[in-house]
Image (cartoon, rainbow, N blue to C red):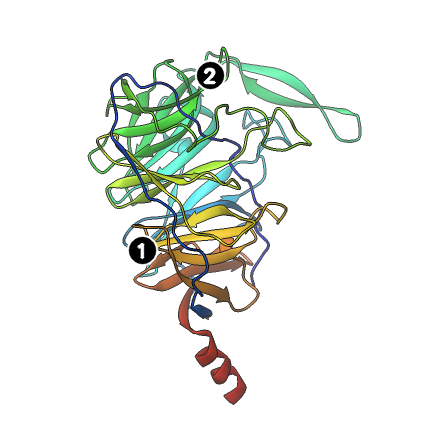
Amino acid sequence: MREPALALVPTVIIALSAAVGAQSASTIAPGSKSTPVPSYRVSFERREPIPGISATGAIELPFLCTSDGTFFVNFVGTVPAGAGIQPPLVQPALLTSVSPSGRGHTFRLDQVPELYVSREKDHFASDSEVIFLVRASRENKPVKRTYRRKDGSEGEYEDNSAPQHLYILSFTREGEYRRTTEIGDTFSILRLGVFPRGTFLAFGFEEKDHSPRLAMLTQDGTFLKSLTIPAGDAPQSMVGGADARHPHAVAPAELVPSGHSILIVQNNTTFPLLEVGEGGAIRAIRPHLPDGQQIRHVIPANQSLYVIAGSENAEAFAGTIYEVSPEDGALLKRFELSDGREGSEVACVHDGKFLSLDYGDGKVIPVVGTAEVAATAAGRERNK
């Protein structure tokens, strides 16, 4: 059984401030878009359920994935009584990892010692650790608050009135808590990634004027340096223009691990992918998408680059999967998924295999997809 995903898209768009130091940057120029793209069809095979891992009826997209093919999914639950979370605005989620060998782990923020987490803002998985960006406090001062239900009546919940700060929580890949790092108030951080050597990539905005910021932090969470990119490769403002119906909204963006670098994905825009190296150098990658299509998401992969592209008015996670050359942005392959799956349901592409999952009835079932040339796949279907 495959349940529908609850698409909780990060609402952030990236633009960058002036740099503290000069940063090197290179751009991959677009080429011809007229070359036909070979088509492939992906057929999926279900594996055995993951022991010891339970699923709820909804997940948070997009997935995370590491280079060994382990993918991470947030299962969205219900708000427990006394959780200090205002229902129904924020639903708790439990991050779960699924490895290619069929092992699963969960990452429980409620087990972090001497910290009261009120909100998870972001999470990021690397080959060595899993980090969470959270808003939390060091003490608990319970207070009763009220909220307005949809029917107009008032409800009551318990909140923590103690001062809150941003923290980075680090876990092992097996779900064991490592350390808590408090972040300074240099700027408002919304998304966070970690490089293999332990430094952090953070982006957010200046609260006084909403001007965007992209910066690197040291391993102890202190500010290291600001980064910048050439004009025109990112919006000038984080706020406004993301949606005409919500003029003060911000467009979503993702941080995706890519070898020793991190990709910044500016979702649903014509702005390029931004590859940020460990030293802070930024490279723009412009996939040669068909006219009228935008990058919706990037599917993590240990080989090549896979993007989901769709039209501006398409549903949030609908679109076509393309394999893209990381060197020049050329489209190498186009993929059609069987079983009615959407591109957003692919967690990652590992060694050419498309990894996904089915979930329901409390079970998590890994699903592995194999790509064949479309004509060959169609012939197999006719001969069945």
Q: Position of residue 284 (x, y in %)?
A: 35, 39
Going 49% across and 84% down the picture, which residue do you hit? 379
Residue 181 visible? The answer is yes
Residue picked out by circle 1: 304
Q: Position of residue 19 (x, y in %)?
A: 31, 19
Going 64% across and 17% down the picture, which residue do you hit? 145
Quarter of the figure with the N terminus: bottom right
Going 36% across and 29% down the picture, which residue do you hit? 230
Q: Amino acid at mark 2?
A: Asn
Task: Give residue 260's mark.
Answer: none
Q: Secondary structure at mark 1?
A: loop
In the image shown, does 344 or 125 lie closer to the viewer? 344
Q: Earlier in the sequence, mark 1 or mark 2?
A: 2
- Label 1 packing within 10 angstroms: few (<14), some (14-19), many (20+): some
Q: Position of residue 21 (x, y in %)?
A: 25, 18
Residue picked out by circle 2: 140
Going 27% across and 20% down the picture, which residue do you hit? 225
Judge from the rendering whether residue 109 lies leftward or rightward of residue 153; answer left or right. left
- Label 2 packing within 10 angstroms: few (<14), some (14-19), many (20+): some
Which mark lies nearer to you, 1 or 2? 1
Q: Position of residue 332 (x, y in %)?
A: 38, 61
Choose top left, top right, bottom left or bottom right for residue 257: top left
- 312 to 232, vertically: above or below: below
Judge from the rendering whether residue 183 lies leftward or rightward of residue 290; answer left or right. left
Residue 384 visible? The answer is no
Q: CA distance from mark 1 to mark 2?
A: 47 Å
Choose top left, top right, bottom left or bottom right for residue 98: bottom left
